[in-house]
Amino acid sequence: MLRTIRAKLLIGFFLIFLVFFLILNQMVARNIESGNHKIITDNLIGLKINSTAYVRQSFLIHHFANDELYFGQIAEEMAQDLQHDTSTRIGMYSLAGELLYTDDPTLFTAEGDDLKQALQGKTAYTITEAEGTASVLFAFPVAVEGTKVGIIRFAKDFTVLYEQSNQIRRTIFTIAMVVFAAAFLFTYLLSRHITVPLVKLSRASTEVMNGKLDTRLSLGRQDEIGQLSANLNRMMERIRDQIARIEQDRDQLEELNQVRKRFFDNVTHELKTPLTTIMGYATLIHENEARDPELFDKGMTHIKEESRRLYDMVLELLAMSKETYGTETRSSVDVGGVLRDVCETMTIKAQRYKKTIRCEAEEGLFVLGQPDKLRRLFINLLDNAIKYGFAHTDIEVIARLDPGKVRLVFSNRGPAISPEQLSRIVEPFYRADPRVHEADSAGLGLSISQAIVEEHQGSLRITSEGEFIRVYIDLPYGTAEKEGNE
């Protein structure tokens, strides 16, 4: 319990008030006692002055000498007059301490310190408190013309004074307790006002620590704790967003790792196939030592073809690496002119595959790019259309200007491609139909094409509608004059 803020506040407040109350009580008691003593002293001094003056006057009226004997003779008369004037009980004593007169012997039977001090020529008083009463015995020697003649002792009741003092102390105590109760209640409410939302904040932070990032706080406050709650909510939202981003990046890295693994597996497989053929025929030729001309010619032909295929594959790998990581200076390129030139160049190969290329390219199709890479892009797409399309069909290439972009469409007829195959068709070494294995193909053409288009801030999309395969390429448009000014 002592670990909570509320308990610490309440116990701390109680201890502070207790110390304050003890100090206040001690100071009040001391001040009241000092005040009472001053009031009593002042009152008794007045009695002494008046009584001494009265005794002197009595001696002068009766023409007595300054003698203790005469004091004893008029002690009763003086006591009665003084008692009437002061409303105080009086005892008259000789200088030897003998009681000469009193109307209440019970008050003056005991010999107190005040009488002993008076016998020694001093003025003294003794305060007695008992059963809610307070009385004072006040004794002093009386001197007439410098000669001591007797001792007067007063018994004065100060019960009212002490009752007033006790009432003041009770009032102060009551006020202090009321203040304490009000302050304690205020401290309790304040501690609850502070600790209850802090407990909620603590529980929320524990839930967040345990992984519940959807935890939210709604304290409905505008103070610092409310601001802290709002900040905690925003912090949890940012943490959740960061974790989601980290998970997304993790998934992307895992996917990239899988892509890299497939890529290297495919590279290994594609490189191993021609190498195996080359090594096999080389071994046969070596073992026959050219005794079989037919086997020798056949082996050399395969070695030559597989070597060329292996060489082309390495070139394509290097090209793809360059497209991915290289940067070159760009300039304004007339895409229509490059496309028409490529179509004309690829016509001979298309005729060999019994296909026809039809090209329609508008004038003034400028983009900011690299001519050699755009040429390679068009060659790759036309090469795929030639190799994988049906024989005796047309390959249509259209280039036109759309708002803010240059659109190129490559269309041919060939085997249908499923949606799953379309989603992976630009991956390195992937073939939509694994049964089709062109000797000239390494499965990198579309990967290189995709990299070239992305480097030119464009987009590449492939569709398959029945036998019609279309490749859509969009490149940002820019006029020759504009690019030249830049």
Image: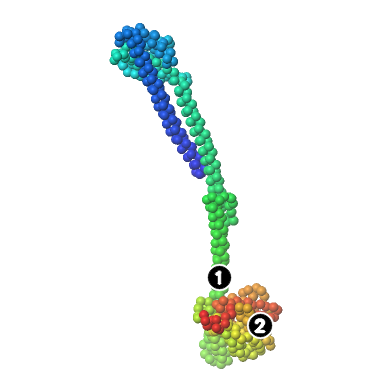
Residue 415 horizontal/vertical position (percent): 68, 80
Mark 1 neighbour density, 10 Å: few (under 14) some (14–19) many (20 or more): few
Classify residue 95 by image quadrant.
top left
Q: Which residue is mark 2?
A: 411
Foreground pick, 378 / 232: 232
Residue 309 horizontal/vertical position (percent): 56, 84
Foreground pick, 450 / 48: 48
Q: Earlier in the sequence, mark 1 or mark 2?
A: 1
Q: Is residue 25 above or below residue 273?
A: above
Classify residue 230 by image quadrant.
bottom right
> Which amino acid, mark 1?
Leu
Q: Which mark is residue 256?
A: 1
> Which amino acid, mark 2?
Ser
Q: Is any part of residue 429 visible from this angle?
A: no
Classify residue 397 by image quadrant.
bottom right
Image check: 56 left or right of 426?
Answer: left
